Structures are given as structure tokens and as C-alpha cells.
Amino acid sequence: MMSRTRSRIAVVGLVAVLCSSTPGFVGVATAAPCAQLDDQRGWGQPVWCAEFDDFLDPNEWAVYDSPGHAGNGRRSPGQLFLGDGALFLYGTPDGTTAGLAARYTQQYGRWETRIRLYPGAGSYHPVALLWPAGGGGGVKPNGGEEIDFLEVIDDPERQRPNFFMHSPQGRQEAHASLDMTTWHTYAVETSPEGVVGYIDGQEWFRSDIAVTTPMSACLQLDWFPGEGSDGEAWMEVDWLRIYALT
């Protein structure tokens, strides 16, 4: 009998993403085309979009092919899949997993993504984050800035989202209770006044510390062996949209 994971691959008919790049390289990319959206929050129209309908353009994405987080396991392009208009990141029990970074960068603006998680190994951390340009894929950027606008830690049932902002001034954080096995949107805004985080359009984090460099969005399923239950994990991403600061 096939496992639920293997059955899911067969039923959904996922297609492996056939692209890779130098880990950690993030450059300025031309804007991916965006459909006209209903501007309910006054953010305007996105300047860059990923709808995950067909393939990952290597001109728009840096797909990790490198050692995993802290050198544990492996980030492999073969662990990214596309199907049903979504991107899937899959982590195996031995720590073979996935991550990728958008090449589009901006210092101030808004990033939003729609994500659904599945119950899985607590040792896997699904993460949506901003790195300064040049970070990601195991490359630590200069300046110590990092914004994890969604991170799940040792939470097999995926019920506790966390927000972490790292800066030279230290770490700030927020936590919530949420069933992340259903679809939710997670967003972050950077401006000269600081950083704001949102879940489903509702503010849940605020800091008056502003970022000092252009940032890029990364999607990662990070493996922390020995820091939670073993096993496999899935992370499903419906879309990623980036807005200029109006």
C-alpha cells in the first residue's frame, strides 16, 4: 500500500521543477506579470507575482541546491513540485527538502503569500521570510537582518504561527493560535517607520525598526533534526505577491 504522501503525489499529479541555480544568489529581476486584482486594502496592484501555474522561471527564482539549514540534510530542486496551480515543498525523513528565493528585491513595500500546511514532522519548520539581497540558501547576509513573517517550530499539527524579526538591535517576535492546515495569507510590510506583520489582513506584529537594505522573499521547509518529531512534511503555496510601498 502506498503511503498517504505517495498517494497524494499520484492523485495530484505533481511535476518536478526542472531548474536550479547557485544557492544564495538573489539579483534584481524584471517583474513577473500580475493579473488585475481587487484592491480591498489600498495596497494598489502588485508589482511582482508568482501564481505557480506552470513552471519556475530561473530568471525570477533562485532554487536552492545546497546543504540544508545549519548544514543539516540537503536542499534539493527535486523536492519542489508544481500541481493544481500551487507550489509544493516536500521534506523527507532523512532531511532532503527544498527552498527557493525570489530574485525580485525592494527595500520598502509589502510581501504577501497564501499558504496551507499539513500535519507532519515537528523537526520541519515551514518558513516564509525576507532576506537582504544575497541571502538565502544557507548564505547569511551582512548586517544580521532577517524577517520570518511565518515560521512554525516543533508543531506537528501546525497550529502555532510565529513571527521573528532579527536586526542588529536584537530579536522581536509575535505568536498566534491558528489552524494552518487551512488556507491563510501571511504578509509583511517594510517602511521607513518600521515593520508590520499580518495574518489574513489583520495586524499581529509591529516594530519601529526599519530595514536598511533591499529584501527578497524566500520560501523554505527547513529541517532541524533532533528538535521535534521525525518524519516527512509538506508545505503548499498558492501564490506570492509583492507590492510597492504606496
Image: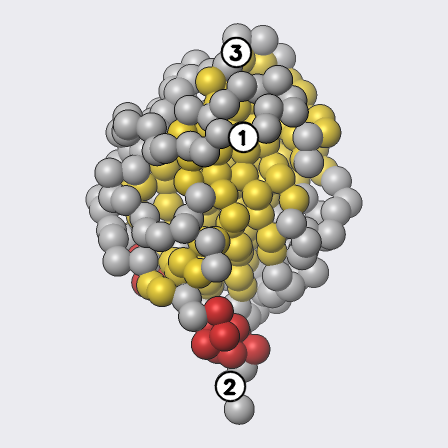
Give the CA separation, mark 2 to mark 3: 50 Å
For the point 65% across and 25% down, the residue is 40
Residue 239, position as x, y percentages in the image: 49, 43
Mark closest to the chain's N terminus, 2 or 3: 2
Position of 241 with respect to 159 (left or right) is left
Secondary element at image label 3: loop
Give the CA separation, mark 1 to mark 3: 16 Å
Give the CA separation, mark 1 to mark 2: 40 Å
31, 223: nearer the viewer: 31
Q: Which residue is mark 1?
A: 37
Q: Amino acid at mark 1?
A: Leu
Q: Residues within 10 Å of mark 2 (few under 14, many from 20)?
A: few
Asked if residue 140 shows in the view, the reply is no
Check residue 2 in the rendering and tell me which mark sits there, or answer none. 2
Mark closest to the chain's N terminus, 1 or 2: 2
Above or below residue 201? Residue 94 is below
Q: Which residue is mark 3?
A: 246
147, 84: nearer the viewer: 84
Occupied quadrant, residue 142: top left
